[in-house]
Amino acid sequence: MALKFSINATISPPNQGKALSFQALVINPFFFFPFFIYKFIIWFSRVMTVKVNYKNSSKTLKNVKNLVNKIGVPSIAPSPHESLQKGNWVKLICGASFEDVVDIRNLSLVYTLAGVDCIDCAADASVVSAVNQGIEAAREILPVRRPWTMISVNDDEDLHFRKAEFDPDDCPLDCSRPCEKACPADAILLEGKKPTAEVANGTDMLGESKGGVITERCYGCGRCFPVCPYNKIREVTYVRDATATAQLVKRNDVDAIEIHTSGSRQITPFEELWDGLGDSVRNLRLVAVSLPNNGETTIPSMNKMYTIMEPRLSCFNLWQLDGRPMSGDIGRGATRESIAFAVQLVAAKDRPPGFLQLAGGTNAHTVAGLKREGLFRKSITKHLTDEKSTANALIGGIAYGGYARKIVGRVLNSLQSQHGLALIEDHPDHLLEALQEAIALVGTVKCYDDPFLTH
């Protein structure tokens, strides 16, 4: 039986006292049937696309979990302190001046899943929050062990605590812009490229830029300085404030601190910084001192600094051997200086207490270099009393900075080019790719048992 309906209405025009009545057209609802079918098909196709994408994402995320479980990260990961004792400690260096909270959060998530023991970042509240957000996001995917969060400070001018700066309006129009090509952090944008302002997961992202140096992304590597043909790029250095750092440590989301020092004969700046930190250091699990190789003066300087720290040192301490600062290149030569530094200090009988950790030029060849010297995961037993003894590795572990960021950064750049400023766990394909890169590096130290772990 056909369906039909009619509408009766009475209208009283304003200028007439007499009512006007009419009957509306008889409407057949099947007249609209093709339109409804079309809308239903569009809706159904969208729903199915979402379901397919969700299914694929779920499958990829499952692959992420399977990969982490396969190599045994949740089950074999000891505490960070135990890693130092065994010689398989791995630290991710986000950069003492690197403040791009989007990348830092995503890097922290990826390397937490890969099993690092510590994540070192700038002594800035928003950066520390980004690290901890990344760690917690990783732990929501899998119940992996939580790495320590470390902040880096300096006692004087230091290569790690500087930024590049220039006015793009001063650049000649015919400049080939070698600075933009040389920057490993993509921190120089010219030709009208503008990062957008977005907010994700409650974290403020990069704001608009008119070109030049993106301050948050610049970590002070200095590669742009010598390539500028017009000498337009300036170096801006800074020293972290001790009082502000002490307040940051007291927030209870910082586990460790690293003091960058020149390690020279003049240690007054180090002493002033240590005094400025006050009792905040009692909240820490680890105090690290990063210093370069100063030859014969290195050990005496280390002993002086340890004497300054010892009265208030209630946690473990570590010496970061910065062999070739700010040089996370891929070649074998980049890591030689850090290994030579390690050989020198291991042989020193009068060095102060504390774990030794390599940094500066570390990359995929560092473990092989330590093995050649017989220093990889090699322990020495110290007799504390007639009944007690302890065995610690000669080299506690390795910190990876520029190289670690580079191998995962390629994936993060791809993620951003496709999806903008995004959380990597929302795109499991990218997360899986980044995690494979991270595990291939971390696994060389952790000795994960998986055939693809070759870099």
Image (cartoon, helix red, strand yellow):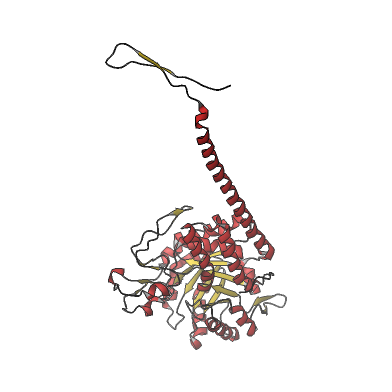
Q: Splitting the image into 4 quarters, where does residue 243 fall?
A: bottom left
Foreground of the two, 338 or 152: 338
Quarter of the image for the N terminus: give it: top right
x then y, percent, for residue 400 = 54, 73
**Above or below, comparing residue 55 to residue 293 in the picture:** above
Foreground of the two, 12 or 260: 12
Residue 253 visible, this orientation: no
- Left or right, residue 202 beside residue 88: left
x then y, percent, for residue 209 = 35, 62
**Above or below, comparing residue 202 to residue 315 in the picture:** above
x then y, percent, for residue 135 = 56, 59
Q: Splitting the image into 4 quarters, where does residue 163 fall?
A: bottom left
x then y, percent, for residue 389 = 69, 76
- Left or right, residue 191 beside residue 150: left
Foreground of the two, 124 or 3: 3
**Above or below, comparing residue 424 to residue 371 in the picture:** above
Residue 124 visible, this orientation: yes
- Left or right, residue 330 beside residue 272: right
Q: Residue at x 34, y 64 (%)?
A: 192
Furthest residue to the bottom? 296
Badge count: 0
Q: Residue at x 30, y 74 (%)?
A: 174
